[in-house]
Each structure stands twice: as C-alpha cells, then as structure tokens.
C-alpha cells in the first residue's frame, strides 16, 4: 500500500480511525502503519478525536425551543427597515464599536473640511513697505496715462484704433 500522507489521501487514515474501512483495506493499512511513523501518529491523533466525540453528550433541547424559534422568526419578519439595518450592531461590544465610531468621526471631519475649506491668506512680500508718497505717485501716473489714452483716441485717423 502507498503511504496515504505522501499520496495526499489522508481521508483513508481518518476512516480507519473511525472504524469505517472495509476489512481488507484495514488490514493493508495496518501493515503500512507498522513501517510508517507519520501515518501511525495521525491515526493515533484521529483516534483521540473520535473517542472525544463519542464521549460528548449533546445538551438537551428545552421544551419550548420550537415556540421560541417560531416567535423569533415572526419577529424578524415584522422588523422595519431601520431595525433590520441596525440589528447586527446591537450586540456589538465596546472594543468593536470604538474603531467604527472613530472611523466615522474621521470621515465626517474630512467631509466637513472638504466642504468648507479655510481660505488661504495671500503671503505678504517680506521686507517691502509701501509708503503713502509711492501710492500718490502711482495714482498720478495712472491719471496721466488716462489722459494720454483719451488724447490718442481723439487724434486717431482710423475708427478702429484706440
């Protein structure tokens, strides 16, 4: 017999430990187990699992189980859409709710900042001071240019010229 672990067929070892193999296959596997420590170890581990499952007693079902089950089903059918959405979050412990709440808060803050960005003030040139006499001269220069522009348009031979 080929090694079930090497041939990737460990279900044969599980079936042997559960006592579900045919007699001829079980005898061939027992001969293999005499020489293969890995398969022997897996069969021993599976035998422990099967003994634990055989010893386990399932708890009895309460007499009013069916009545409570059908009531819960009926309650679930009559839920509003809001209750259906929030139902998975009701039993949530604090350690799970805190990261969700923090994430929601961060998303809210990001939305508010993107909705109402703070205006950026223009940077004032460093070291440049504007004096009143400079402003006065600039206004005089603009007035002079306005006069030149008006005189130029009056003397222009072309109607399209400025």
Image (cartoon, helix red, strand yellow):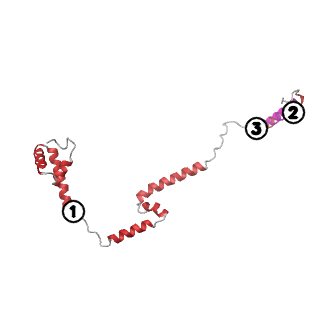
Disc 2 and disc 3: Cα gap in Å?
A: 29 Å
Label count reads 3
> x and y percent of residue 110 in the render?
54, 50
- In which quadrant of the rendered image does the N terminus lie? top left
* Residue tagged 3: 131
Question: For numbered disc 2, what is the local secondary structure?
Answer: helix
- Residue 74 locus on image (x, y percent): 41, 68
Circle 2: is it few (<14), some (14-19), or many (20+) Cα within 10 Å?
A: few
Q: Nearer the viewer, residue 143 or 111?
A: 111
Name the N-terminal-most of marks 1 and 2.
Answer: 1
SS at circle 1: loop
Q: Residue furthest bottom?
A: 63
Please tell me whether residue 149 belongs to the stretch shown in magenta: yes
Element class at badge 3? loop
Residue 56 marker: 1
Q: Position of residue 4 (x, y in %)?
A: 18, 44
| 3D distance between C-alphas at marks 1 and 2 | 108 Å
Q: Nearer the viewer, mark 2 or mark 3?
A: 2
- Depicted 9 relative to depicted 67: above or below: above
Q: Which residues are magenta?
A: 138-153
Instruction: Answer whether residue 146 is magenta in the image.
Output: yes
Q: How much space separates mark 1 and mark 3, taking CA atoms?
A: 96 Å
Residue at (43%, 66%) from the top-left corner?
77
Residue 158 occupies quadrant: top right
Mark 2 touching mark 3, by CB under 8 A? no
Residue 58, image quadrant: bottom left
Left or right: residue 79 versus residue 17 is right
Crowd around label 1: few <14 · some 14–19 · many ≥20 (10 Å): few
């Amino acid at each position: 017999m080929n090694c079930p672990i090497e041939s990737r067929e460990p279900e044969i070892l599980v079936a042997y430990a559960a006592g579900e193999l045919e007699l001829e296959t079980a005898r061939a596997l027992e001969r293999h187990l005499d020489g293969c420590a890995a398969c022997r170890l897996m069969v021993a581990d599976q035998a422990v699992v099967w003994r634990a499952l055989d010893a386990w007693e399932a708890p009895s079902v309460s007499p009013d189980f069916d009545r409570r089950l059908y009531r819960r089903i009926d309650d679930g059918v009559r839920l509003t859409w809001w209750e259906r959405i929030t139902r998975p979050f009701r039993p949530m412990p604090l350690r799970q709710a805190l990261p969700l709440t923090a994430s929601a808060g961060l998303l809210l803050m990001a939305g508010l900042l993107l909705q109402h960005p703070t205006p950026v003030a223009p940077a004032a040139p460093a070291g440049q001071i504007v004096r009143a006499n400079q402003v006065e001269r600039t206004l005089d220069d603009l007035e002079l240019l306005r006069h030149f522009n008006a005189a130029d348009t009056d003397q222009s031979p072309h109607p399209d010229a400025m």
